[in-house]
Image (tube, rainbow, N blue to C red):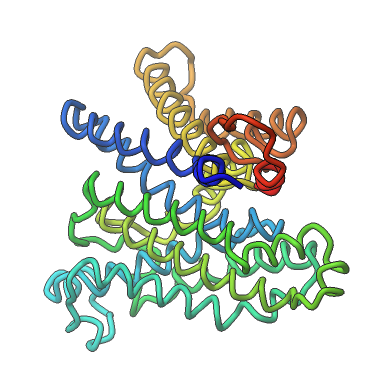
């Protein structure tokens, strides 16, 4: 293969990253420089949502297993990072029953966020192996039950989370720039995983577990490693989220938020990086527009009753339509790539590499 065709093949294969990251950075710079505070807040939320969505996509998109548990890992990371970074005086006032050794700890924000990811990964490592041994259907049900268990623990563990009450006083650290950098790192990680040997093995077990086992792939082990990795990413995303909203309660990491994350993946397509990104864009924009519409309807007293839940209803209907029209999502399982430019002459090696990509 000629040098020109090698360069062309490389650019074609990895052009997805440029297509996603360049507009993401350009929009971030433009909004940071010229956008209103509302637009900055929305874009910051969008970047944090990208981190949460890709934490689910790494596992669900490559294994084919619907995971409800990841929003629980987001919550674990949020609480761990918040506890580690919040000032002792604030913790002693806000959570009177907190364990003394937790009250006395105060670390810088970024190490707290990374440690929050490790805590989420540790929990996933403890509970994950038995779950990954189950069949796909039983695994989905068990992961849903695990989310309920995590939520109950967060709601009842008064000495750590303040129970069902609000945990407040978390430092306001997650700026647009911080969230943008975090989103870029997670996109790169998700793309690397998709192209890695572990990602290829996991997709092999998804597509045909018997054929994968025949060539020596340990399905349980590759699922387990991916589950722990994706939980770590979810925990880090939770740390960014905690230091953006600065106060939260266990209900912020339960069904409503998981529904939004799943809607982003279902609408865009969980099987590809491009699909997860596209779904997050679509749902974030639709969510903000529907919230504004709902507020305008209620403020104008157009109806004799107040409208609630319009966003969730529209997202649910949109998910159903997408599943009927395009079960793989709007983008599907293929990545969005730039057109392939070939040199003169027929290069069978280049053609073969294009097909492999």
In the rendering, at what x and y percent does residue 18 appear?
Answer: 43, 40
**Residue 290 or residue 263, whichever sits in front:** 263
In the rendering, at what x and y percent does residue 324 appear?
Answer: 77, 31
Q: Residue furthest left?
A: 89
* Residue appearing at x 11%, y 74% in the figure: 89
* Residue appearing at x 23%, y 35% in the figure: 29
**267 shown above or below 154:** above
In the rendering, at what x and y percent does residue 334 appear?
Answer: 65, 41
The quadrant in which residue 90 appears is bottom left
**Residue 103 or residue 201, whichever sits in front:** 201
**90 shown above or below 105:** above
Q: Is residue 180 left or right of residue 265?
A: left
* Residue appearing at x 62%, y 67% in the figure: 197
Q: Is residue 146 left or right of residue 161?
A: right
**98 shown above or below 75:** below
The quadrant in which residue 233 appears is bottom left
The quadrant in which residue 147 appears is bottom right
**Residue 42 or residue 218, whichever sits in front:** 218
In the rendering, at what x and y percent does residue 198 appear?
Answer: 62, 69
* Residue appearing at x 76%, y 60% in the figure: 206
Q: Which residue lies furthest to the bottom in this view?
A: 101
């Amino acid at each position: 293969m000629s040098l020109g065709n090698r360069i062309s093949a490389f650019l074609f294969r990895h052009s997805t990253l440029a297509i996603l990251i360049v507009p993401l950075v350009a929009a971030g710079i433009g909004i940071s420089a010229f956008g209103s505070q509302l637009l900055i807040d929305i874009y910051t939320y969008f970047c944090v949502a990208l981190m949460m969505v890709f934490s689910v996509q790494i596992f669900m998109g490559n294994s084919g297993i619907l995971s409800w548990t990841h929003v629980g890992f987001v919550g674990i990371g949020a609480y761990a990072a918040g506890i580690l970074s919040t000032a002792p005086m604030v913790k002693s006032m806000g959570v009177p029953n907190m364990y003394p050794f937790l009250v006395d700890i105060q670390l810088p924000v970024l190490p707290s966020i990374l440690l929050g990811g490790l805590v989420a990964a540790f929990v996933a490592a403890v509970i994950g192996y038995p779950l990954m041994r189950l069949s796909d259907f039983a695994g989905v049900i068990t992961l849903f039950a695990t989310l309920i268990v995590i939520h109950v623990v967060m709601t009842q563990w008064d000495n750590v989370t303040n129970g069902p009450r609000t945990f407040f006083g978390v430092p306001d650290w997650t700026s647009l720039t911080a969230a943008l950098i975090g989103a870029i790192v997670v996109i790169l990680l998700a793309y690397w995983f998709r192209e890695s040997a572990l990602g290829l093995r996991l997709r092999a077990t998804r597509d045909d577990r018997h054929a994968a086992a025949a060539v020596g792939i340990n399905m349980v082990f590759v699922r387990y490693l991916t589950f722990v990795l994706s939980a770590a990413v979810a925990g880090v995303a939770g740390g960014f989220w905690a230091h953006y909203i600065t106060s939260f309660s266990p209900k912020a990491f339960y069904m409503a938020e998981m529904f939004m994350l799943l809607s982003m993946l279902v609408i865009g397509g969980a099987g590809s990086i491009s699909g997860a990104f596209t779904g997050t864009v679509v749902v974030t924009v639709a969510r903000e527009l529907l919230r504004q519409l709902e507020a305008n309807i209620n403020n104008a007293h157009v109806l004799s009753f107040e409208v609630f839940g319009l966003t969730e209803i529209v997202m649910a209907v949109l998910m159903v339509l997408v599943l009927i029209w395009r079960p793989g999502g709007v983008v599907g399982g293929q990545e969005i790539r730039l057109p392939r430019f070939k040199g003169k002459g027929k290069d069978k090696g280049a053609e073969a590499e294009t097909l492999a990509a």
